[in-house]
Image (cartoon, rainbow, N blue to C red):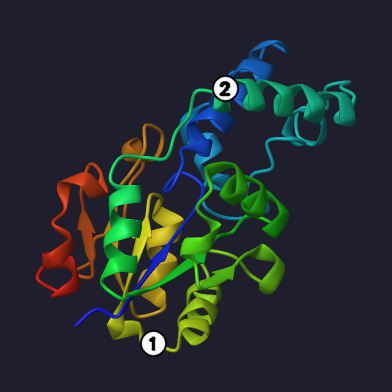
């Protein structure tokens, strides 16, 4: 029996990732460089150590670009694109179903806490989460399992008693490494990425396509 649900944030609760990719892609175009999704996928759902889209043009391609000005332009474009984004389909139903059913609700994100708090407040959903773990709480983010392990401990549940809700391959790997089952609901960007095959992971277009009662009963 499932006792807790732990959500990823970026790309899962609200699709910030598509806006980030489009903002970076457009910024790269201004400098005559194509940013492919394959290249950009190195930083989806994890840290910027594998691929840092803020610095690549300067460090790898040696283009004479002002780093701060570049960062600010990308952030402005991202903010503009995010104005039309809403909570993804099925998320609010799951949050309400879980709360009404007495399930514990957690959040495990590779993003910084300030970023998470900004959107949780904006979306007015912070009160749903009993435990929140972010990049501020761990040494290594996803695909390392530490974020999920800390969230499980904070909710006082075992890995076999919780389900992770994820959108990216790195997030799914983290949940699997923590010993959890995982529902993968890719967004417009991550649906084209390659996910590891795992008996612990269930794929769906959105949470609206997954019966909550079957999930709680572990029937997925």
Residue 14 visible, this orientation? yes
Q: Residue furthest front?
A: 100
Residue 151 x %, y %: 50, 77
- In this view, 82 is above or below 173: above
The label on residue 71 is: none
First reached walking from the N terminus: tag 2 or tag 1 = 2
Residue ID for mark 2 = 81
Distance (Cα) linking label 2 and label 1: 37 Å
Residue ID for mark 1 = 157
Residue 115 x %, y %: 67, 49
Q: Nearer the viewer, residue 96 or 87?
A: 96
Q: Is residue 125 left or right of residue 102?
A: right
Classify the position of the C terminus by image quarter: bottom left
Residue 35 visible, this orientation? no
Question: Residue drawn 43% across and 48% down?
Answer: 13
Classify the position of the N terminus by image quarter: bottom left
- In this view, 160 is above or below 140: below
- Asked if the residue under mark 1 is in contact with the one under mark 2, i.e. CB atoms within 8 Å, the reply is no
Residue 108 x %, y %: 51, 65
Question: Residue drawn 48% across and 74% down?
Answer: 148
Crowd band around label 2 with a 10 angstrom C-alpha radius: few (<14), some (14–19), many (20+): some
Crowd band around label 1 with a 10 angstrom C-alpha radius: few (<14), some (14–19), many (20+): some
Question: Residue drawn 28% across and 51% down?
Answer: 93
Q: Is residue 147 left or right of residue 202?
A: right
Q: Is residue 120 left or right of residue 90?
A: right
Say what secondary structure mark 2 lies in: helix
Question: Residue drawn 57% across and 22% down?
Answer: 81
Say what secondary structure mark 1 lies in: loop
- In this view, 42 is above or below 184: above
- In this view, 25 is above or below 127: above
Which corner quadrant of the image does residue 192 belong to? top left
Residue 190 x %, y %: 39, 40
């Amino acid at each position: 029996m499932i006792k807790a649900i732990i959500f990823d944030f970026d790309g899962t609760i609200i699709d910030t990732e598509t806006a980030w990719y489009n903002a970076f892609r457009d910024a790269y175009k201004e400098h005559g460089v194509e940013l492919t999704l394959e290249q950009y996928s190195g930083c989806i759902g994890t840290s910027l150590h594998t691929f840092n889209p803020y610095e690549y043009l300067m460090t790898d391609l040696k283009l004479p670009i002002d780093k701060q000005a570049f960062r600010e332009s990308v952030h402005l474009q991202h903010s503009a694109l995010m104005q039309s984004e809403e909570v993804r389909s099925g998320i609010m139903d799951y949050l309400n179903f879980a709360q009404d059913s007495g399930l514990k609700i957690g959040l495990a994100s590779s993003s910084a806490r300030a970023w998470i708090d900004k959107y949780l407040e904006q979306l007015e959903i912070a009160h749903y989460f009993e435990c929140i773990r972010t990049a501020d709480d761990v040494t290594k983010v996803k695909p390392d399992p530490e974020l999920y392990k800390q969230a499980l401990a904070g909710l006082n549940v075992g890995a076999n008693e919780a389900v992770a809700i994820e959108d990216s391959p790195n997030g799914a790997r983290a949940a699997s490494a923590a010993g959890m089952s995982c529902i993968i609901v890719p967004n417009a960007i991550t649906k084209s990425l390659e996910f590891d095959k795992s008996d612990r992971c269930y794929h769906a277009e959105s949470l609206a396509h997954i019966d909550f009662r079957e999930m709680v009963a572990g029937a997925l």
